[in-house]
Amino acid sequence: MSELSQWSTQICPIGLASELACDKWMPIILRDIGLLERRTFNQLLKNNLEGISSGSLATKLKRLEHVGLISSIRAAEHKQKKLYYLTESGIDFVPVLFAMASWSSKWHRPSAKFVEALRPYLSEPEPTMQGLLLKLRQTNLERKKLEPMSWMQRGPESVRASPG
């Protein structure tokens, strides 16, 4: 049993989830990799709406890989370039991200343009979410090249990932 596994058997599931995946940056990085299809360090750094630093990004990417929410592969065109993907565990975390979005939309006032883009997943979550999770499995696990996710197409241009 790994050190992490031994420790995890000693705490509450909420505490464990918080330890593994919850600080300011980790859900944001998961959003950017999975939902905005930002695959490289530079895409994640330059297109991050919340302004993460390069040091924080590097640290959080290592942590997300360590806890099994993302994986990386070397890019074929450049040996030092990594491409990041959600793992099955990371994909399974996406409904948690949407639950967080639903809560903040209900009790606070996030950007209306982003709330509108997410609305189908917040108002009728089950069938819409299952379709999204299927597409995430295809793009992240099977590495299929698919059209951008429909919620991205409805969303503001500033949300789309740019090459890099």
Image (cartoon, grey):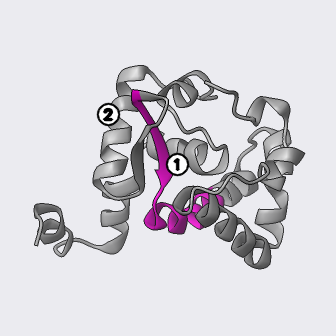
Q: Which mark is residue 30?
A: 1
Q: In the rendering, at what x and y percent does residue 7 appear?
A: 14, 66
- Residue 12: which quarter of the image? bottom left
Q: In the rendering, at what x and y percent does residue 48 appear?
A: 59, 29
Q: How many marks?
A: 2
The residue lying at 51 percent from left, 33 percent from top is: 40
Q: Which mark is residue 59?
A: 2
In the rendered image of this protein, does residue 138 appear above or below residue 55?
Answer: below
Callout 1: SS: helix
How packed mark 1 is, by other alpha carbons closer than 10 Å (few <14, some 14-19, many 20 or more), is many
Segment colored magenta: 79-100
The residue lying at 85 percent from left, 40 percent from top is: 113
Is 106 one of the magenta-colored residues?
A: no
- Could you tell whether 46 is left or right of 18 in the image? right
Residue kind at label 1, given as amino acid type = Leu
Q: How far apart, in angstroms, are the residues tagged by discs 1 and 2?
A: 14 Å
Q: Are marks 1 and 2 in contact (CB under 8 Å)?
A: no
Q: In the rendering, at what x and y percent does residue 125 appear?
A: 75, 72
